[in-house]
Image (cartoon, coloured by chain):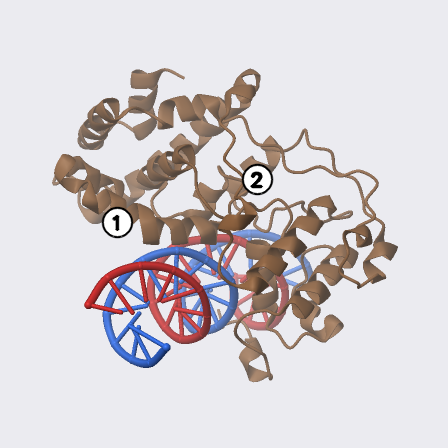
Chain colours: A brown, B blue, C red
Amino acid sequence: MGRPPCCDKEVVKKGPWTPDEDIVLVSYVQEHGPGNWRAVPARTGLLRCSKSCRLRWTNYLRPGIRRGNFSDSEERLIVHLQALLGNRWAAIASYLPDRTDNDIKNFWNTHLKKKLIAAAPRANTTAALSSPPPSPALIKDQWERKLQTDIDLARRALRDALSVDVAAAAAVPQPQERSPSSNGPAAYALSTRNISRMLDGWAPGKGAVAGSPTTTPGVAESASRTSSSELTECSASSASNNNNKPSMLACETYATPVVPPLSAIESWLLLDDSIELELELELELAHEDGNNLLDVAIRNYAF
DNA sequence: AACGACGGCAACCGCACAGGT
DNA sequence: TACCTGTGCGGTTGCCGTCGT
């Protein structure tokens, strides 16, 4: 299988995106929906690689993205999901639909990793959070196969848990909106935030998947959890207005992604520390005993 | 005030995979 | 079935702002 043709054969611009480029990209996506990224540079005149366009959209311009401070519950959720799923950031991000995988990855690498390392003296088992629990009884291949099975089972059960817990959705802690005063340093970042904000009113038209740049099962799960959100087509004609005003988004109605009902999973994931240590120990034992992660979780937390 | 070290984060790179032909 | 193309994903890089000296 050959490597896909890369844009670097052409003259492509690299580096930070400018507000003008963002507006061009946003306008294009409004009109055509996300996808067919290969056509974007050609049809918009952007001197950007198609991959760069996609990345810019999915990680920054896409509606419904929340940036900035991670709440404590988000932090703990990430830690536990990372322990379960490993560095599968897209899968982890599917459980935090308003966060991008890139954001979560960066947050993990810059904050959580250090935090866990700093907390290591508290419990040696914390190391298990950043790497699969090694079992002397299992050789690497066996371990990996088993891990994959465990992940699949865990994800299925998480999905089930989420689907039956709608009633508890109200209990989901709402992460704090980042205040404008805590914005990043760059004035440009501010402007892109504004672009993102103005896109809150936008929902893709037919054939476009709202806020779902990926087709991974995890995202599909995320999408299923937003099924109650109302999606309405936007007026394509509005996209021709390029004056960077919110009014350019002439959607009749729109829906921001519904925060998924996470209380059941959170009640399991957001354990207190003492329970957490017991669980980690048992998870290691479970691997040696041939049990799966989910059995342990169910046995302990019975969701 | 100037400079260097450090940290955070946006963006890039390259591989893997899925779907179409 | 094999190949091609588009897209997704995780790892890594490099820029830029902040902090300390």
User: A211 or A17: which is nearer to us?
Assistant: A17
Helix, strand or loop under label 2? helix
Left or right of A299? Residue A286 is: left
Asked if residue A165 shows in the view, the reply is no
Q: Amino acid at mark 2?
A: Ala
Residue at the image point whose x is 74% and y is 47% from the top: A202
- Percent position (x, y) of residue A270? 36, 27
Marks 1 and 2 share the same chain: yes
Relative to A222, say whether A296 is above or below: above
Left or right of A196? Residue A66 is: left
Q: Chain of mark 2?
A: A
User: A274 or B7: which is nearer to us?
Assistant: B7
Relative to A196, say whether A178 is above or below: above
Q: Amino acid at mark 1?
A: Lys
Q: Going from the N terminus, do you reach mark 1 or mark 2 first?
A: 1
- Percent position (x, y) of residue A300? 29, 17
- Residue identifier under label 2: A220
Task: Work out how far the residue at label 1 is from the one at label 2, CA to CA, in angstroms.
Answer: 31 Å
Q: Chain of mark 1?
A: A
Residue at the image point whose x is 41% and y is 32% from the top: A73
Residue at the image point whose x is 20% and y is 46% from the top: A117
In the rendering, which numbered label is found on residue A114? 1
Left or right of A282? Residue A167 is: right
